[in-house]
Amino acid sequence: MDQLERMLNLSEPERAAVEKIQSRLPVGITPYFMSLVSRDDPQEALRRTVVPTAAEFITTPEEADDPLGEDSMSPVPGLVHRYPDRVLLLVLDFCSTYCRYCTRSRVVGHGAIYPSRSRLERAIEYIRSTPAVRDVLISGGDPLTLNDERIGWLLSQLRAIPHVEILRIGTKVPAVLPQRITPNLVRVLRRYHPLWMSLHFTHPSECTPEATRACERLANAGIPLGSQTVLLKGINDNVATMTALCHQLLRMRVRPYYIYQCDPITGSSHFRTAVESGLDIIRGLRGHTSGYAVPTYVIDAPGGGGKIPLMPNYVEGREGDMLLLRNYCDRQYRYPDVIGS
Ligand SMILES: *Cc1c(COP(=O)(O)O)cnc(C)c1O
């Protein structure tokens, strides 16, 4: 509280939340990210993503601590195997900055998922003995908060498994701690190609010269970069903000990958939007700007169904063999489909 008060003029709901936070998702903000946050405006976008507020303590009936059922699809601690050919490896539960809408707030920041060698070796052993796994997504917490040697050890272990074709790292470090993307880290990472990275950018204000430099170093090391963005009410849930973000990302050599509908995680009601606002964003992007700037809008299905893509309806029906289509300018077109071939 003392530190926050030195840097921000806290509102009453923010102060109440910080006092109450105790064993819940901790508050953590890097000095760099704090420098981007508004000192006086509690409604400013980046401030809302990292400073808790009293609404976090409201729980609605549809919310759950683990809506995606990750814990029930975990063959070994800290490893989620939901899809046939890829796994999610939760390396640790620590982040340098905690997003208030975190989908993994049930575990993140609690010291429950520890990057011990023995636990990671069990997870690696599961992957080694499961030949169907050709893609390993290394996430957490934020894996890039580990030191370079640990990261190199983990990547080398996974790379040594013949059936693991690609490695991926999920991280918000380029947005919240871009100084961590050092030349030495990049030298370690580039040894383990094909290595892909999913970054987490939420708002165009995060696309600073520092973040741009971090992404440039990663891209120059041959790492394809994607960004995952959570749709957040009053933060990025309109066409103008999302277009600005996607354009900035392309300039930073980051391909917008997913827009996520916000999961019904406990205490998230002040962040969640109507699905229609997500569809409006896709409608406002597709055709109006570079295809590379248009991410896939998905709902990660509660109950563990995985990511389900949502699209505005461009197919209006049929007239005999003719498919009736609607384009981005709302005009109708007909395509002679091949029936029964
Ligand atoms: C999102 C996710 C993946 C990766 O999905 P892609 O669509 O391939 O990016 C893998 N495992 C789990 C459990 C996930 O939630």
Image (tube, grey):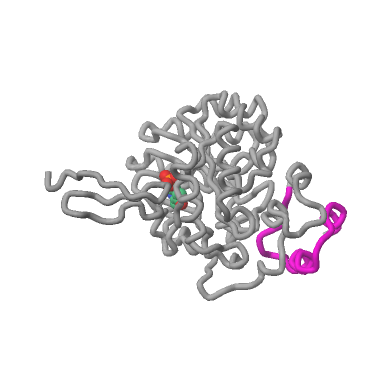
Whether residue 9 appears in magenta in the rendering, the answer is yes
Residue 79 in picture, x, y percent from top left: 47, 50
Determine the residue positioned at 76% across, 68% down.
Answer: 13
Q: Quadrant of the N terminus?
A: bottom right
Return the x and y of residue 129 as percentages of the image width and height: 36, 42
Q: Nearer the viewer, residue 11 or 44?
A: 44
Determine the residue positioned at 72% across, 55% down. 44
Nearest the eye: 18 or 321: 321
Q: How many labels were placed on the picture? A: 0
Q: Which residues are magenta?
A: 2-29
Task: Tell me: residue 247, above or below residue 49.
Answer: above
Q: Quadrant of residue 249?
A: top right
Q: Left or right of 6: which side holds 331? A: left
Which quadrant holds residue 74?
bottom left
Which residue corresponds to the image point at 56% horizontal and 57% vertical from the top-left? 104
Q: At which x and y percent is residue 189?
A: 56, 29
User: Is any part of residue 215 visible from this angle?
Assistant: yes
On the question of residue 110 being in view, the answer is no
Which residue is pictured at 66% across the width and 64% down the height?
24
Task: Please indicate whether residue 209 sits to the left or right of residue 6 in the image.
Answer: left
Q: Residue furthest front?
A: 331
Furthest-left residue in view?
341
Q: Quadrant of the C terminus?
A: top left
- Judge whether residue 185 is colored magenta: no
